[in-house]
Amino acid sequence: MTDQTQAPVAIITGGGRGMGAAIARELHERGYRLGLMSPSGSAVDLANELGAVGVKGSAGEAADLEQLVSKTVEAYGRIDAVVNHTGHPPKGDLVDITDEKWALGNDLMVLSVVRMARLVTPYMLKQGKGAWVNITTFAAFEPSLVFPVSCAYRAAVGAYTKLYADRYGADNIRMNALLPGFIDSLDHKPGTGDNVPMKRVGTMNEIAKTAAFLLSDDAGYITGQNIRVDGGVTKHV
């Protein structure tokens, strides 16, 4: 029987629905103990189902991140992996987007990763190991005017991912970004999959398994990468 006190611990923000919940279930099946957070409270419900730590809060709020980390450490004594996952910020026509909306996007997508790194890196350094996955979007590399705030800040997360990986690679701490394409976590318009080389939208399960791989020792020499899981929809090499 596996000693649960030795099982790895993962934190997932946006971990109550969609891709975040799928990742939580996949990691749970692989033996991880979990700390989950979402603004709606759905992460608390899922945590109750999985026997995990659940917190209601937003990744864009520093105090909520601090609460998630502290409760997870209090419960399990360590943190081995982090999945930074958030939804899209407000949309709008490019030059009409207000400062407040840009600031919200910065808090939600960039500073959430920066703050979480500040909170969790000391634990990973002490343990001598750690792995991160930042969920962004395929449009970080091929920006869309439909999601201008998201595209701008997801690209920033890609840069931060590389910077962090370079800084802490020698400490056996890895960070990668996972860039989903059109995934069935959202209700897409009919025919969306026709524009994808694989002629379908992706599944949350495919994202979950890729995230789990990137956090695992099987991906032990992969760090600083922006990995597209998009069925080939992006064009650049």
Image: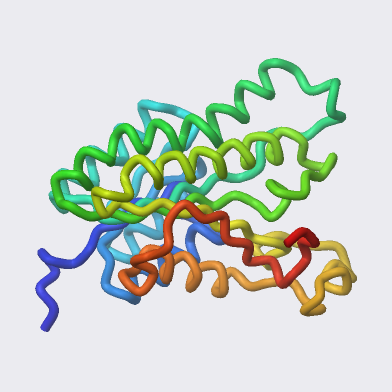
Q: Nearer the viewer, residue 149 or 33?
A: 149
The furthest residue to the top:
99
Q: Nearer the viewer, residue 19 or 236?
A: 236
Percent across and percent down for residue 177 are: 52, 53
Percent across and percent down for residue 16 are: 47, 55
Residue drawn at point x = 31 percent, y = 40 percent: 68
Residue drawn at point x = 35 percent, y = 38 percent: 117
Percent across and percent down for residue 207 are: 55, 68
The furthest residue to the bottom:
1
Q: Seen in the image, is 38 located left or right of residue 143? A: left
Q: In which quadrant of the rendered image does the N terminus lie? A: bottom left
Q: In which quadrant of the rendered image does the C terminus lie? A: bottom right
Q: Quadrant of residue 143?
A: top right
Residue drawn at point x = 63 percent, y = 66 percent: 229
Percent across and percent down for residue 214 are: 43, 65
Q: Seen in the image, is 107 located left or right of residue 127? A: right
Q: Is residue 128 above or below residue 189?
A: above
